[in-house]
Image (cartoon, grey):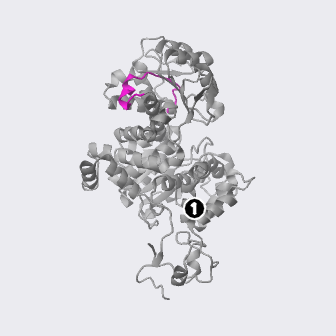
Amino acid sequence: MMIMHPDTARGIEVLLNPIYNKGTGYSIAEKERLGIRGLTPPRQFTIDEQCAKIWNTMTTTGKTPMHMWRSMQALQDRNETLFYRLIVEHIEELAPIIYTPTVGEACKHYSRLFRRPRGMYFSVDDVGEFNAMMYNWKNDVSVIVVTDGSRVLGLGDLGAQGMGISVGKLDLYVAGAGIDPEKVLPCVLDVGTDNEELLNSPYYFGIQQPRLRGKEYDEFVDEFVQAVKNRWPNALVQFEDFSTKNAMPILKRHRDNVLCFNDDIQGTAVTVLAGVYGAMASIGSKPSAIVDQTFVICGAGSAGMGIANFLHSAMVHHGLSKEDAYKRFYVVDHKGLITSARVLEASAPGVEDLRAFAASRDDLPEGMTLEDVVAAAKPTVLMGASTARGIFTETILRTMGECHERPIIMPLSNPTSCAECTAEEAAKATGGRAIFSAGSPFDDVVVDGRTMVANQGNNFYVFPGLGLGTILVGADHISDGMLNAAAEAIPKILTREQLNRGEIYPAIKRIRDISVKVAAAVMRQAIFEGREGRDGKIAQIFHQEGLPALEQYARSSMYYPEYRPTVFSPGSGAGS
């Protein structure tokens, strides 16, 4: 049953409120009760019939992705339940519309496309007032997605227009993991912009001044985080699309004292690790066998090192010492293999992490070419985060195929024009035997009658279920162990037949099933680590009934978009 807020008036205002509006979905009894009889067409449609009609209209030939994005925004503005039901029913088709890549185009023009307020904006004009501002948002909050708009997808600095990213990401939390839409809050930190076009635009709705930097910027972010903690101490804060130089310092500063998560850093790393676990499962290995893998990682930037660090953490989790785990990695950049002989700039971002990997490499020459490194190291996994198109040459790929029956090849750079190799190149060089996963979409490839599946990693596999599990268990911190548990859970939804074909990620259409598995695994790990914050309730369920009970608890806790009978709360003045 849906109980209407006491301040909601009867009549036309019900139809103008997207939370309560059902359009043509009201029964006669509801129309009478809500004072809207005669204000809607007489025939009552089910929500499935409404979905079918809208989907038919939206997918008419000639409709561009941006047209579909606008149509979805208009639907959300008038009927939130139907909006989320449509996404749930057509998640594979609509995820790229409400989020990447289409939302990036929308963010470029967000000031012009702005229709109605959604979420909260914290600007440089509000410094010192964040605590008070939080109380302008009346609802309880479980998940916050916040951006400063400094690195929106691959589009750079879009300032306050990054709000579209926060909104779209939370729509995926709702659709993918059943987070209650009334308990999500999209936020943007408007610290200015260095985008000249926005600084000079008469239509830009953000602060038109250069970005804050240094101490002022750090204090701004810290004030926001503390204000969230004061208002909603159990809320999960996801940092989204912060610039590389700020993302990791913010995460390191806050991850131990606030329930927070950075999808660009941690979500990407978990997705890649899930792919590695899936690839290992396809050849019959358990997750613990990660300690036997050897990685060559091409690309020593923030993306490559973030992934390397998390893979290293997974090896340690499964029993290797830190020192022995570092020896399983060969990191190559544009200068070649990075070894203990490399002179690294002390001020370079992530230099300490890079030093740790470099220190273990004194067995091969400094600057050795990628081709020679692959030949010498014989890695089980070749991974690219370099954005250097074609750097995985035919020779390198052929060497991978000669060294291993099922080599794991992961060109993670995107877009497609930056991929280290294509699926076709990997398939032809390995006779279709490679287990392939990319950061960009490719078609499956058939070589000599054998199909090589072109898997694609997607952070959507991770963050909804991670958020759901963290919230349900009441954790105060997201540990590396919980992240590893999420990665291990994702391939477990695949059948043996799918794994044998080389599929290492499930289909996105099963996102709710995936999120249930991830949430349960995260809850179990939190219990093992003593992080449960629900007075032992979840731990009791687990210890009495096991992991399936946690999965059932997660599934039963999910919001599902459907029409419920609507009534006024007592004392609302409904009879006036």
140 or 487, which is in the foreground? 487
208 vs 479: above or below: below
Q: Quadrant of the N terminus?
A: bottom left
The residue where tag 1 is placed is 83
Residue shown at the point (42%, 11%) measured from the top left: 363
State the residue at coordinates (41%, 21%): 328
User: Would residue 452 be found to the left or right of residue 203 on screen?
Assistant: left
Tell which of 165 and 5 is nearer to you. Answer: 5
Amino acid type, residue under disc 1 in the picture = Phe
Using the image, determine if residue 382 lies above or below residue 466.
Answer: above
Q: Quick check: is 299 in the magenta stretch? A: yes
Secondary structure category for the residue under label 1:
helix
The question of residue 165 being in magenta is answered with no
Asked if one can make out residue 114 in the rendered structure from this viewpoint, the answer is no
Total label count? 1
- x and y percentages locating residue 343 in the rendered image: 47, 18
Q: Counting other residues with Cα less than 10 Å from the Cα at mark 1, is it few (<14), some (14-19), or many (20 or more)?
A: many
Figure check: 22 above or below 69? below
Q: Position of residue 392 (x, y in %)?
A: 59, 22
Image-based side of 321 in relation to 493, left or right? left
Segment tinted magenta in the rendering: 284-302
Pick the residue in front: 54 or 449. Answer: 449
Q: Horizontal and vertical percent for residue 72?
A: 62, 59
User: Is residue 51 something that shows in the picture?
Assistant: yes
Q: Measured along the vertical axis of the image, is residue 130 above or below residue 36?
A: above
In the rendered view, does 168 fall on the left or right side of 292? right
Expressed as whole percent of the image width and height from the top left, the position of residue 298 reads 53, 24
Q: Residue furthest bottom?
A: 576
